[in-house]
Image: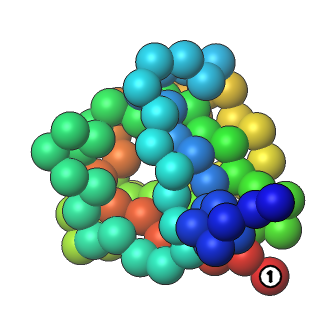
């Protein structure tokens, strides 16, 4: 049986590539700043089917932007340890 919190989970972010290290669930909605513990440390993401995780290099949705969907074992050299804000939405 799933809980209401699980139903709102849009993605999971990981500290290291290949879904290793600390992880954090991302709910649908916006996060203008990922927080001091997660700022510039994200290396891989798992996005639920039908959902999209939009990320920015700076807080408050500023700077370069990218979108991720599905399982992304490595966000790439230009995004590794660079994400500071995000939005996540599902169809």
SS for dot 1: loop
In this view, which residue lies farthest toward the left?
36
Q: Which quadrant would residue 5 be assigned to in this image?
A: bottom right
Q: Which quadrant would residue 69 be assigned to in this image?
A: bottom right
Q: Which quadrant would residue 9 be assigned to in this image?
A: bottom right
The N terminus, quarter of image: bottom right
Residue 54 visible: no
Decide: is 12 above or below 8. Answer: above
Q: Position of residue 70 (x, y in %)?
A: 79, 48
Is 28 positioned to the left or the right of 82 in the image?
Answer: right
In this view, which residue lies farthest toward the front?
1
Decide: is 38 above or below 84. Answer: above
Is 63 positioned to the left or the right of 3 in the image?
Answer: left
**Which residue is the site of mark 1?**
91
Q: Nearer the viewer, residue 64 or 55?
A: 55
Decide: is 23 above or below 28. Answer: above
Residue at x 70%, y 52% (from the top left corner): 47
Q: Position of residue 58 (x, y in %)?
A: 25, 58
The C terminus, quarter of image: bottom right
Residue 17 visible: yes
Residue at x 49%, y 79% (from the top left corner): 29
Is 15 positioned to the left or the right of 7 in the image?
Answer: left
Residue at x 20%, y 52% (from the top left corner): 35
Q: Position of residue 43 (x, y in %)?
A: 48, 29
Label 1 neighbourhood size at 10 Å, few (<14), some (14-19), many (20+)? few
Q: Nearer the viewer, residue 88 or 75?
A: 88
Q: Position of residue 75 (x, y in %)?
A: 57, 34
Total of numbered circles in the picture?
1
Residue at x 28%, y 55% (from the top left corner): 34
């Amino acid at each position: 049986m799933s809980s209401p919190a699980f139903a709102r989970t849009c993605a999971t972010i990981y500290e290291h590539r290949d879904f290793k290290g600390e992880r954090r669930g991302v709910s649908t909605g916006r996060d203008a700043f990922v927080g001091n513990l997660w700022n510039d440390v994200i290396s891989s993401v798992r996005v639920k089917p039908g959902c999209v995780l939009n990320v920015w290099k700076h807080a408050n949705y500023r700077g370069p932007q990218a979108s991720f969907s599905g399982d992304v074992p490595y966000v790439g050299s230009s995004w590794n340890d660079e994400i500071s804000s995000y939005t996540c939405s599902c169809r």
